[in-house]
Image (cartoon, rainbow, N blue to C red):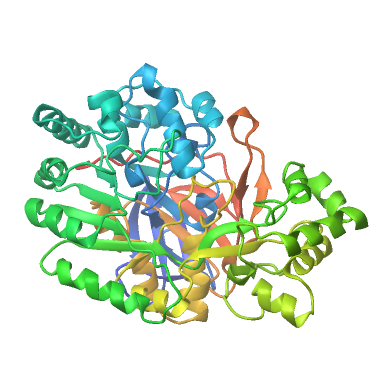
């Protein structure tokens, strides 16, 4: 009997930690039906000779809550092997929401996550009030990949308390109502609840995001509803004593951001020590960005430098910027202003991504802007402008404000923190970390050797599946849903970021492609073939307990 699809002759990585093993894989009706040697033919066959075959990757930290409503393929994560994305992180969501509050939530998402407000207001159907209704809307739109969502504290608090929810304490009735709505959202399919405790996240008028200042007993009441349903509690910016209190009082499973800041070699080990103190006997999972991150600098992204001439450059389109820096008089004025005035960018924190086929994310003297300028006997602005000119405006520099020390980050991952936090869908004009899973393959597995292929794939698949409560994804086993990647382990890599204008209301964003992916399947359908998206939209909204 013929199968729907047979993937033949690949190196199968089970997603559970096992080493690659030669074999075939059969798919029928969106489900894996045979693993090993498959004798029967497939109505469709994929030759995976020399390729690595893995489960689809699960992205635990995205902000695709808006983009999924107008871009079912949610590029570029789908070009980097991601077949399931968790949305609703950091306490910022678009539900629950009354019609009169839509502009406020759009503004909150813009100031916190750099998603254009005009795109949000124009691109979302806004045909919901509660969070279950939002998930229903995403389902009707037909996602290209699987989507799991969490209800966010910011929208929840404003829904229950109105304007008072920004800074005031909730009364007992309001706390009880928030807890009830979280339980209802999970019963409707949300996989959990997210809360923001990072004071740097602000609403448009400069005040902290609703929930940032909430009393701990409010978090405990909500956490009890999460825990009794075995759902997920996600937070960003919460102090470890707060984590200890909430998890200790509720028993909730918790996912928290653990990206490092600072240059010290022992930063990762110190963070692990703090985690281990509160983690014993509890279900706590940390996740961190996979490399140095902060902001991309270049004509296609953020323009460094301060002064009148730099301000003029910042306001031009890309073609005009390139022409301007090639004008000798304009260029000399840029350099003069950079010599006289300190801008926000620090040349010692900026690393050139190079002009090769894939970005150079090493953090060494060979690509540090300050060191490169010194070696060339130039001011940093001269080096920046020269490289920008030589690359026809493509040059990008990574201004690293997080994970400045890769040794410390390596220790963190080696100690059990998950790689992730690509922030896909957010910070669309300044960051492009959506290819984080591909970077794990190219750097942490192939180049650095931190992970074996088996262990590295487990950190991208079955590990996150367990955290999200997904029982039928994350492993190449009979009966599992056919979310599958096929790639060349020797060449897989990210492509360079670049800017496109494809968001609603004419807004632009950074995106990037990938190298080395043969195919990505979502629920048995080809979503990507040879790096190109297909028309298939076979994704599902993955609901808690479903």
Q: Is residue 476 visible?
A: no
Q: What residue is at 29 percent from the left and 76 percent from the top?
A: 270
Q: Position of residue 282 (x, y in %)?
A: 13, 63
Left or right of 293 on screen, residue 460: left
**Which of the 4 image quadrants contains residue 222?**
top left
Viewer-proximal residue, 284 or 49?
Answer: 284
Residue at image point 48% right, 68% down: 291
Residue 119, compared with residue 193, is above or below; it is above
Q: Is residue 147 left or right of residue 249?
A: right
- The structure residue drawn at horizontal position 45% and vertical position 82%, both measured from the top left corner, is 449
Q: Position of residue 113 (x, y in %)?
A: 46, 44
Quarter of the figure that contains the C terminus: top left
Residue 105 versus residue 230: which sits nearer the camera? 105
Q: Quadrant of residue 17?
A: bottom left
Tally of numbered discs: 0
Q: Is residue 243 left or right of residue 432?
A: left
Using the rendered view, name the quadrant where residue 259 is placed. Answer: bottom left
**In the visual, does 138 lie left or right of 244?**
right
For the question of whether residue 119 can be seen, the reply is yes
Q: Name the residue at the right extreme.
A: 328
Nearest to the observer: residue 444 or residue 404: 404
In percent of width and height, residue 470 lies at 26, 51
Q: Position of residue 313 (x, y in %)?
A: 77, 47
């Amino acid at each position: 009997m013929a199968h729907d699809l047979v993937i033949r002759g690949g190196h199968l990585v089970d997603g559970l930690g096992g080493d690659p093993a030669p074999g075939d894989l059969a798919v029928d009706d969106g489900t894996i039906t045979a693993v090993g040697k498959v004798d029967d033919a497939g109505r469709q066959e994929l030759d995976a000779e020399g390729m690595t075959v893995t489960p689809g990757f699960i992205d635990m930290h995205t902000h695709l809550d808006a983009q999924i409503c107008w871009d079912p393929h949610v590029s570029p994560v789908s070009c980097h092997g991601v077949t399931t994305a968790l949305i609703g992180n950091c306490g910022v969501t678009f539900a629950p929401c009354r019609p009169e509050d839509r502009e406020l939530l759009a503004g909150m998402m813009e100031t916190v996550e750099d998603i254009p407000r005009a795109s949000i207001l124009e691109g979302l159907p806004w045909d919901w009030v509660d969070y279950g209704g939002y998930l229903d809307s995403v389902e009707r739109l037909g996602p290209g990949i699987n989507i799991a969502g969490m209800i966010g504290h910011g929208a929840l608090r404003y829904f229950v308390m109105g304007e008072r929810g920004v800074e005031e304490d909730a009364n007992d009735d309001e706390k009880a109502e928030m807890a009830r709505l979280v339980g209802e959202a999970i019963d409707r399919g949300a996989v959990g609840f997210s809360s923001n405790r990072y004071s740097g996240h602000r609403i448009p008028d400069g005040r902290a995001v609703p929930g940032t200042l909430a009393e701990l007993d409010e978090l405990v009441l909500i956490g009890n509803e999460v825990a009794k349903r075995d759902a997920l509690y996600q937070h960003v910016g919460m102090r470890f004593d707060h984590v200890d209190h909430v998890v200790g009082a509720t028993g909730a499973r918790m996912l928290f951001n653990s990206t490092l800041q600072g240059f010290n070699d022992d930063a990762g080990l110190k963070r692990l020590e703090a985690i281990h103190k509160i983690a014993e006997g509890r279900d706590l999972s940390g996740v961190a960005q996979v490399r140095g991150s902060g902001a991309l600098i270049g004509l296609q992204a953020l323009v460094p430098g301060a002064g009148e001439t730099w301000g003029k450059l910042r306001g031009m389109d890309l073609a005009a910027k390139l022409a301007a820096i090639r004008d000798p008089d304009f260029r000399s004025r840029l350099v003069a202003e950079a010599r006289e005035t300190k801008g926000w960018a620090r040349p010692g924190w900026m690393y050139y991504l190079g002009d090769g086929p894939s970005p150079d994310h090493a953090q060494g003297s060979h690509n540090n802007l300050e060191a490169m300028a010194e070696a060339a006997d130039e001011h940093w602005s001269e080096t920046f402008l020269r490289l920008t000119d030589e690359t026809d405006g493509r040059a990008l520099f990574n201004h690293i404000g997080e994970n400045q020390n890769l040794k410390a980050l390596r220790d963190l991952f080696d100690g059990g923190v998950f790689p992730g936090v690509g922030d896909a869908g957010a910070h669309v004009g300044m960051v492009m970390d959506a290819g984080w899973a591909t970077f794990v393959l190219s750097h942490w597995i192939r180049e650095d050797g931190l992970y074996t292929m088996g262990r590295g794939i487990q950190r991208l698949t079955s590990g996150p599946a367990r955290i999200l409560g997904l029982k039928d994804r994350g492993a190449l086993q009979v009966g599992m849903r056919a979310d599958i990647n096929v790639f060349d382990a020797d060449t897989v890599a990210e492509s360079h970021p670049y800017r496109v204008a494809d968001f609603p209301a004419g807004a632009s964003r950074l995106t990037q492609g990938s190298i080395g992916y043969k195919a990505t399947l979502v629920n048995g359908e080809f979503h990507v073939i040879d790096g190109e998206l297909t028309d298939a939209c076979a994704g599902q909204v993955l609901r808690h307990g479903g």
